[in-house]
Amino acid sequence: MKTTVVVSLSLFLSAACTHYPSHPVTQTQTPFGGMNEAARQTAPDVTRTVDFTRIRNARSEPQNWLTYYGAYDGQRYSTLDQIDTSNVRQLRPAWQFQFGVIGLVPNPATYSFEAAPIVVDGVMFVSGWDGYVWAIDATDGSLLWQYKHSIPLDTPLCCGNVNRGVAVANGRVYLATQNGHLVALDATNGRKVWEQVFADVRAGESATAAPLVVKDLIIAGSSGAEYGVRGHIDAFDLATGARRWRRYNVPKPGEPGSETWQSDEWQRGGGSSWITGTYDPELDLVYWGTGNPGPDFDGSVRPGDNLYTSSVVAFDPDDGSLRWHYQWTPHDVWDYDGVNENILFEEGGRKLLGHFDKNGYFFVLDRSNGNFVRATKFARATWGDIDPATGRVTARIGPTKEGVAICPGPAGAKEWPHASYSPATRLFYTPVVEACGTFKLIPQQFKEGMAYWGGEVAIDKQQWGHVKAYDPATGREVWSWRATHPILASLLTTAGNLLFAGEPNGHFNAFDARSGELLWRFQTGSGIHSNPVTYSVNGKQYVAVPTGWGGWVEGYAPEMYGAPRGTALVVFALP
Amino acid sequence: MTRAPRLLVVALCCSILMLAGCEYARLLRPSVLKQLNPRVVRLVNELPEVDHPNEAIVARLFAHGGLSHAKLGSDGVFRDRVYVPKNQYIWYPAIVVMERGGELELEFSNDDVVTHAAFVPSDGDRQVVLLPVHQAGKVRVTLNHPGLYWFGCPISNHAGRGMLGLVMVKGETPAEAKLDRPKQDRP
C-alpha cells in the first residue's frame, strides 16, 4: 500500500514537472563556428609601419586615409586630384560592400552607418553599427575579415546604435565599442589583442567616437551627457592597453572651473566627449569638444556657466592637463553641445582653428591660446546672440514649462557631421541643419543610468538644409546650396576643386568647391549620415561613402522616419 | 504611564502598522489571490534582483520560458541546456544567467516539430547552430561584459513569434572605469 502511494506520487510529480526534451535526441549538430570563419582571409600587414610619424605626415601620403579626419588638422581635405571638376561627371560605382542584418539585431534600436573608413595601402578598415569591424580589399570590396563585439541590449543609447570609425597603428585596429570598451585587434586577422573598459554603462555611459592615436597613446572619448554622467576623455598605452590618464570635463569642487557650479550638480554635469579631437603636433595640443551639461534643458538646478561643458578643451596629450578652454555656449539649456570638430588652419601666419557650433555660429579662435578672433552666424539662431567682434554671449530664450519655439533645435544648426577646409580655395565648407523646435521644461529627479533631460523638444515638421562656403578671413558667406532635407553627412574636399556632400534622401553630390555648382550626383538608395573619404590604389583614385539611414532621426529630420535603410559602402572611381 | 495614554500609544502603533502593512494586506484580496498561479509564484520567488529599467523585458521572457543559472565547471566554463518545447515558439529556459563574464557553453535541443536554429552572440563573432527536429547542438561563446544579450532563432519569423532568449551576464563595471563621484541614486 505504502509503495503504491509512493510510486503514484512520484509519477504524479514527474508528470507535473515536465522535463524537456520529451523525445530522445537523434543527432547532434556542430555549430558553424562563427558566421564568417570559412570566408575569413588574412589582410596584408599594412598597418605595421603606421606610427605617430606617418600619421603626423598623413597629407604626404594622399593615397591613404590614415586617421579619422584624414589628417590631424581635421580638414577632411585630400591632395588627390585625378577626379576633378572636368571629369567628375564620369564618376561611376567601382564596388559596393553590403552588410544586411542576419537574424537578430541587438534590440529593436535605430542605427545608422556613420563611419569614416580608414585606408592603408589598399586595405580598408571600417566599423559598422553594433560592434562590427571589417577589413576590406579597397580595390574590389572583398571582405578580408570581420570582428563582432557583442553589445548588451541594455546599453544606454542616446541617439541610436552607431559607431563613427576606427584608428590604426602598429599592426592594430582600435575600436571604441558602444558599451565603452576600447578594443585592439590584430589588423591582419581581426582577432582581439587587448581590451580595456573606459566607460560605465550602468552610470549611463557609452561610446560612439573613433579613437585617436597621438604619440604612443590611444585617446578615447565617451558619450552619456543625456544620462547625467560626468564626461571624460581617457588615454591608454597604444601597445599594451595600460591606462595612462583620464581627464574629466566637469571639475570637482576646488578644481579650476568649479566656481561655475553652485551645487553638487557637477556630479551629473554632463560634458561628454563623443566626437574625435584634432591635434597640433607643433603646439603639442589636442583640441577636443565637450557635450551639453546635465540636465540638458533645466538650467535652474545648475546655475553658472557650467565649465567645461559645451566647450573646446585644449590639453597636453602626455597627461591630459588643460592648457586652455573656450566655451561656445555658457550655461547651455538647449542641448547645443560643443563637440563639433575644431579644424586647424593658418591665416596671415597665425595658427587658428575654425569651429561650426550647434548653436549656429562659426567661430575662429587663436589655437595657441584660445583667444577669440571672430564669430559669424551661419543659420537661424534665436536662442541668443554672439557679438561677432568680441564673442560676448547674450542668451535670449530658454525652455519654459509651456513650451517655446527656439532655433536651432537640439540637433543644432550643424549636427556632428564634419565641415571641411580646403587649402586650395582657402574656404571652409559646412553642412547646415535648418530645424527649429519647441523647447519644454520638465523638471525631474536624477536616477543613475536613466535619461536626465529635464525637458523635451518637439522638432518642427518643416526642415531643410544647406551646404555653405565661408571665408574664414572675414566670416563672409561665399556660396550656399539649399537642400530639401538637413545636410547630415560630413563634407570632403579635394585638390580637384571638388566638394562631396551626401543627403538624407540618398543623393551623393559633387560640387565645384569654388562656385557651389552641382556637377554630379548618384542615388545610393539610402540616406547618408557618415564620413565620405578618398584614397587611391595603383594610381586610381576612389571616393568611398558609407550609406545607411537612421540614428537620431527624430532630432534632426523626423519627416525622414521610415526612409529606406541599409548598411552599404559605395565606392566610386572614374571608368 | 496611565491606562488612557497607554491605550492611545497602542492604538497609534496599530494604526502605523496597519498603514505600513496595507500593501501586504491588499495581497489577501480574492482578486489578487486568484492570480497566484504557479507561474506567478515562480516569477516572484526565482526572478533575480534586476535593475528596474530592465525588469520589464526580463519578466516578460521569464513568464514563458523561466530562468536558469548556468553552472560553472571546473574548467572555468559556464554550461547550461536550453530546449525548444513543442508548438510554443519559446526557448526553455528563456533566460540563462552567468554570475560573471566569461565562456558559456549552451547545449540546445529541439523538441518541436519544425527546424530551428540557435543564434548566440559572442565576442569576436556570433555563433549559430542548426537544430533539425529532435536534434541537438552545442555552441561555446564568450561574453565578457555585464549586461543582457539576445539569443534567438533566425529561421523564418520564429524570433518575432517568441523565440527570443536572454543571456544575463551579472557583474559591475571595473572600479577603475567608474566615474569619480559620490554614489548616486539608482532607479
Image: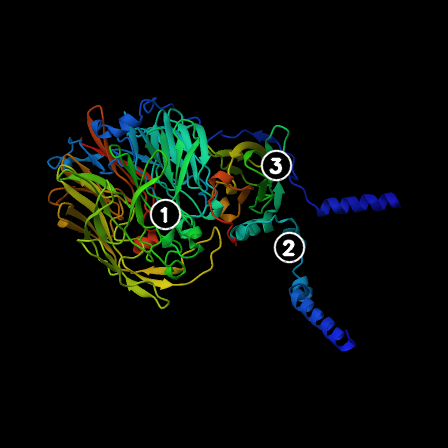
SS for tag 2? helix
Query: Which subunit holds the residue at mark 1?
Result: A
Residue A38 position (above or below residue A515): above
The percent position of residue A380, horizontal first and vertical second, equals 22, 58
- Classed neighbour count for the residue bearing mark 1: other residues with Cα under 10 Å, few (<14), some (14–19), many (≥20): few
Q: Which residue is mark 1?
A: A256
Q: Which residue is mark 3?
A: B80
Q: Extreme right residue here?
A: A1
Query: Mark 3 against mark 1, which lies toward the viewer?
Result: 1
Q: What's the residue at 68%, 44% (across, down)?
A: A18
The percent position of residue A553, horizontal first and vertical second, equals 33, 52
Q: What's the residue at 16%, 50% (across, down)?
A: A481
SS for tag 1? loop
The amino acid marked with disc number 1 is Pro
Question: Foreground: A182 or A261?
Answer: A261
Query: Which subunit holds the residue at mark 3?
Result: B
Do badges 2 and 1 share one subunit?
no
Question: Foreground: A298 or A16?
Answer: A298
Query: Mark 2 against mark 1, which lies toward the viewer?
Result: 1
**In the visual, does A475 lie left or right of A9?**
left
Between the C-alphas of marks 2 and 1, the distance is 55 Å
- Classed neighbour count for the residue bearing mark 3: other residues with Cα under 10 Å, few (<14), some (14–19), many (≥20): some
Q: Which residue is mark 2?
A: B40
The amino acid marked with disc number 3 is Asp
